[in-house]
């Protein structure tokens, strides 16, 4: 594969030098009608190939898209995405057609001369105001989706979880029975207190640290994010959620899980992807893969950035409560 890559680079470099040689060849100053006719027909042929390739890619590679959202708020995010992409695809398809078709239709043959059109205030108003109105609508809709996921003020009985980022791993801390997270600061990092929890804060005593995220289906979750060292980005793709983790400050977003891990494993897109992955792994003699939701870092934060991830398990609330009850609090851990 690497050899093929080098061959392609060599071909591109050779093609570039060839084109430059043609450009600087002063033997022929003006393109002939035959050249214009040929270039116009090539543009039309390219248009056909372009649209054929676009349709093929939509048909062949639609499975690489994420399955339906696993959070209630993510449904609105998906709607925003599909409206935006739909508009882009329609406008792109129409404009590309005109560009290629007009290059063919008005190619320089039969002594045809270009018509000089100075300006049109009407056209300028149309192509300025129309995109402005459409973009304003998309931005306003996007802001409402953003506020929906970052403003937790109207959520009922939310679960509070702190997600702590550092090179190159994640840690999590659940609010205990009081459902209030204690303060945290890097100055308090010592020994097994790896998240810098302030144990002088009374709310910290029952906080529960973990190395795996468990979430209850149907209950809103408010995530608080901190970073120990550099800028990270907490990315939960299946929940359509992402937030920067910034050193020295706390950021947040919220969502309500709507599909357990087991339910998502039955999704047809997930089944197809898992089968393809396991086919490749079997050929390599590797263990089979089982789908899990993941928390990923979406900012390049260092050499092992690619490996910075944490499993997310979504389960029914009763199962979640049993799991949480079996975890040790900060006080219990520090006494050991």
Image (cartoon, rainbow, N blue to C red):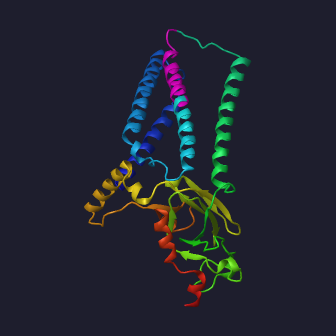
In this view, the residue in front, 241 or 203, is 203
Total number of numbered discs in the rendering: 0
Residue 30 location (% of width, % of height): 54, 20
- 145 shown above or below 111: below
Magenta part of the protein: which range? 91-110
In this view, the residue in front, 137 or 183, is 183
Residue 39 location (% of width, % of height): 46, 23
Residue at the front extreme? 318
Q: Please indicate, yes or no, whether residue 231 appears anywhere in the rendered image.
A: no
Residue 179 location (% of width, % of height): 63, 70
Tell me the residue at 51%/76% (across/down). 325
Residue at the right extreme? 121
Tell me the residue at 39%/46% (across/down). 8
Q: Please indicate, yes or no, whether residue 73 appears anywhere in the rendered image.
A: yes
User: Which quadrant, please, contains the N terminus?
Assistant: bottom left
In this view, the residue in front, 144 or 299, is 144
Residue 98 location (% of width, % of height): 53, 22
- 114 shown above or below 285: above
Tell me the residue at 39%/30% (across/down). 52
* Res 297 → quadrant: bottom right
Residue at the bottom extreme? 336
- 6 shown above or below 299: above
- Residue 111 belongs to magenta span: no
User: Which quadrant, please, contains the C terminus?
Assistant: bottom right
Is 12 placed left or right of 205 in the picture?
A: left
Tell me the residue at 53%/75% (across/down). 210
């Amino acid at each position: 594969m690497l050899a093929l890559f080098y061959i392609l680079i060599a071909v591109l470099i050779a093609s570039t030098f060839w084109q430059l040689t043609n450009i600087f060849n002063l033997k022929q100053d003006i393109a002939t009608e035959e050249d214009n006719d040929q270039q116009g027909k090539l543009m039309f042929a390219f248009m056909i190939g372009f649209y054929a390739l676009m349709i093929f890619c939509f048909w062949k590679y639609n499975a690489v898209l994420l399955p339906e959202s696993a959070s209630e708020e993510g449904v609105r995010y998906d709607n925003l995405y599909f409206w935006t992409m739909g508009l882009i695809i329609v406008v792109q398809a129409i404009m590309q057609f005109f560009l290629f078709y007009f290059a063919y239709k008005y190619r320089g043959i039969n002594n045809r001369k270009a018509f000089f059109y100075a300006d049109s205030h009407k056209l300028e108003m149309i192509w300025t105001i129309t995109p402005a109105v459409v973009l304003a609508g998309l931005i306003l809709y996007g802001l409402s989706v953003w506020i929906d996921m970052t403003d937790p003020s109207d959520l009922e009985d939310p679960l509070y979880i702190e997600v702590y980022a550092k090179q190159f791993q994640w840690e999590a801390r659940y609010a205990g029975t009081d459902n209030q997270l204690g303060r945290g600061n890097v100055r308090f990092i010592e020994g097994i207190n790896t998240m810098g929890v302030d144990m002088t804060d009374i709310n910290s005593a029952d906080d529960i640290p973990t190395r795996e995220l468990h979430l209850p289906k149907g209950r809103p979750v408010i995530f608080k994010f901190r970073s120990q060292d550099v800028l990270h980005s907490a990315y939960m793709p299946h929940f359509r959620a992402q937030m920067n983790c910034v050193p020295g400050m706390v950021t947040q977003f919220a969502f309500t899980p709507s599909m357990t891990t087991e339910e998502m494993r039955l999704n047809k897109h997930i089944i197809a992807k898992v089968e393809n992955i396991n086919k490749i792994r079997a050929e390599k003699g590797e263990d089979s893969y089982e789908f899990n939701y993941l928390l990923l870092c979406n900012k390049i934060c260092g050499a092992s950035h690619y490996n910075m991830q944490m499993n997310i398990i979504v389960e029914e609330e009763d199962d979640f409560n049993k799991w949480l009850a079996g975890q040790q609090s900060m006080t219990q851990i520090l006494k050991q």
